[in-house]
Image (tube, helix red, strand yellow):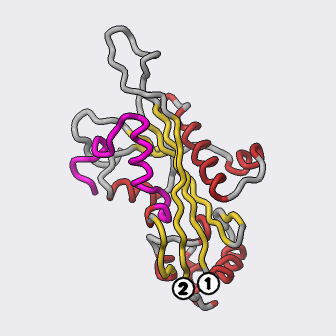
Amino acid sequence: MVGIRLGNVTRLILASQSPARTKLLTEAGIGHDVLVSDVDEDAVQAKYGVTDAHDTALLLARAKAEAVAALPEAEGALVIGCDSVFEFDGESHGKPYTAEVARERMLRMSGSQGVLHTGHWLVDCRDTAADAEDNETPEGTGATVGAVSSAEVHFAQMSPQDIEAYIATGEPLHCAGSFTIDGLGGAFIRKVDGDPHAVVGLSISTLRDLLVHANVGITELWTANPQ
């Protein structure tokens, strides 16, 4: 659990092992637990066929959220799943995993721009009216809803030496699009048009919008001492 809760507030579960997403929520004062899904992203995409970057981000976010929502540990909580996909030259780019793939992408991205799509999916796992006993007041709405937050990322010119130095850190190998904005990769981002939180991997304003469907205000998730 992250932070100290303000009384008996709604529990939020982040269905992601991303340190950047956890850090973002924590710095925004949002208390949450982390419960990682075992979703096979390749299998999910193969099941639904080829989709564009926007829809792929939403599809994977939903798969992660629903997988965690089905676990006993999620009972009585809200679950938020996220996934990011980078769209460049009409292609969808996830994590490169290898130096070779990262190098090829970054050489093309240098001095250019692309769009980072971050899918969000919220599942309300609290009891609804249909689940409640006669003497209970249900809190849950049964909501399962999603949205995508996108931002255009403009890259500075990167020399081959810059690219090799960045790859050598290992940071871009496990990031959608082969870059971060909140780490070393921020040095190569000239500007962002759109929500910068979406580039990190979770839009706080999008989460706020989704919480409306669960009749929860984002201030209900604030912690007493955000770290």
Callout 2 environment at 10 Å: few (<14), some (14 to 19), or many (20+)? Answer: some
Crowd rating for badge 1 (residues with CA inside 10 Å; few <14, some 14–19, many 20+): some
Residue 28 at x, y percent in the picture: 32, 56
> Which residues are the magenta region?
198-227
**Magenta stretch holds residue 132:** no
- Give residue 97's quadrant in the image: bottom right
- For the residues labelled 2 and 1, the Cα–Cα distance comes to 6 Å
Residue 6 rendering spot, x and y as whole percentages: 22, 41
Please name the residue that numbered disc 2 is placed on: 156
Which of the marked residues, 2 or 1, is nearer the chain's N terminus? 1
Q: Amino acid at mark 2?
A: Ala
Predominant secondary structure in magenta? helix
Residue 48 vertical placement versus 150 (above, below): above
* Amino acid type of the residue tagged 1 in the rendering: Ser
The residue pinned by badge 1 equals 110
Residue 193 is situated, as x and y percent measured from the top left of the image, at 48, 71
Quadrant into which the C terminus falls: bottom left
Instruction: Give above or below for 87 relative to 161.
Output: above
Which residue is depicted at the point 54% across and 41% down?
65
Q: Residue at x 44, y 66 (%)?
A: 196
Asked whether disc 2 touches disc 1, contact meaning CB atoms under 8 Å apart, the reply is: yes
Residue 80 on image: x %, y %: 48, 44
Seen at 64% across and 79% down, the residue is 109
Query: Can you say whether 206 is above or below 76 in the image?
Result: below
Identify the residue at the far top of this view: 134
Helix, strand or loop status at disc 1: loop
Left or right: where does residue 153 sit relative to residue 48? left
Q: Secondary structure at mark 2?
A: loop
Q: Residue at x 48, y 73 (%)?
A: 192
Task: Specify the quadrant that holds the N terminus.
Answer: top left
